[in-house]
Amino acid sequence: MFAALELPFLPTYNDFQFKVKHKLNDKNELTIIGLGALDQFELNTKANQTVEQRYILKYLPVNEQWNYTLGAVYKRYRENGYNSLILSHNYLNNKAFKHINNVQDSAKTFDYSSQEQEVKLRYETVTNLPAGFKLGYGASAEYAKYTNSTFNIVANKAFTDTLLYYTSLNMFHYGSYVQLSNKLFNQSLTLSTGLRIDGTNYSSAMNNPFNHVSPRLSASYQLSNKISLNASSGRYFQRPPYTAMGFRDNNQQLVNQQNGLSYITADHLVAGLEYLPNEQSSISLEGFIKSTRTTPTQ
């Protein structure tokens, strides 16, 4: 279609996903999930009749990106709840390059390659307590690796400059949570409260999980069999992007590791209505207030 429209770029998107669930016995089950994508972005050099087409072909690089996520969930049921062990691995590979005059045999003026991968292990347990209470808690550990290699020739009428950049970063992230919920007034009102802590060994500003405590509270009231009123509030700590955490100067020093880069703090307040016309459909109307704070780099 893009070629027929004479657009100067030709994207191709490929996706896959699968899920296998196996019941080992009455108390144990194993679920394996996988999904991924392959995105290829080529230049349509034949579409060069107009000024706009030639301009796009001049600056637009060729881009290739693929990613996947594989995970396994082992769940063991108990009389009053269940335990879960989750292991997953995700990988993102992103490449972009540009040849002189878009001739493949000519030298490159731009060559970019980055990879992000994460291996995550998480344990969770849910227990049904007396008086209708439900208690859930768990812990997680994560290994992450980020690399970036960039070559870029910047040229104008005054000068030509060459940028060479490389960084590699290995990190461990960790966290834990606890959540308590109950249904009251003939199960018309559901209340839930929880707490989460997060940390990473990236820097001294981020390694103490008790400095990143996230309280959460939510309530849901059934106005009728199909309509419910929902509200929630909570604090969330989000890690900065790997591009910021892995940035190095000319001396290969991690710049933001030394200047106090920390988690992004976000406070959320959400309220809304939910309507269930049938078992397969849900219509909701929500409003929210979000306050975000972050530590700027210096």
Image (cartoon, grey):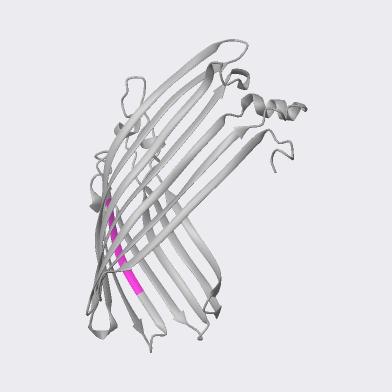
Picture coordinates of residue 52, whole percent (x, y): 73, 29
Q: Quadrant of residue 33?
A: bottom left
Q: Quadrant of residue 131?
A: bottom left
- Which residue is more in the foreground, 207 or 18? 18
Which residue lies at the image location 60% right of the left edge and 14% below the top edge? 156
Residue 126 visible: no
Residue 263 visible: yes
Left-right relation of 28 to 243:
left
Q: Is residue 266 magenta?
A: no
Picture coordinates of residue 56, whole percent (x, y): 67, 29
Does the magenta stretch mainly form a helix, a strand or a loop? strand
Which residue lies at the image location 43% right of the left edge and 76% below the top edge? 220
Picture coordinates of residue 173, whole percent (x, y): 27, 47
Total labels: the figure holds 0
Left-right relation of 86 to 59:
left
Which quadrant, please, contains the N terminus?
top right
Picture coordinates of residue 157, whole percent (x, y): 63, 11
Q: Residue furthest right?
A: 50
Is 85 placed above or below 192 here? Answer: above
Q: Residue furthest top?
A: 158
- Which residue is more in the foreground, 187 or 61? 61
Which residue lies at the image location 51% right of the left edge and 63% below the top edge? 288
Is 8 placed above or below 219 here? Answer: above
Left-right relation of 73 to 156:
left
Tell me the magenta residue range.
192-198
Is 111 placed above or below 231 here? Answer: above
Q: Residue furthest bottom?
A: 186
Which residue lies at the image location 45% right of the left edge and 71% below the top edge? 231
Is 135 placed above or below 61 here? Answer: below
Which quadrant, please, contains the C terminus?
top left
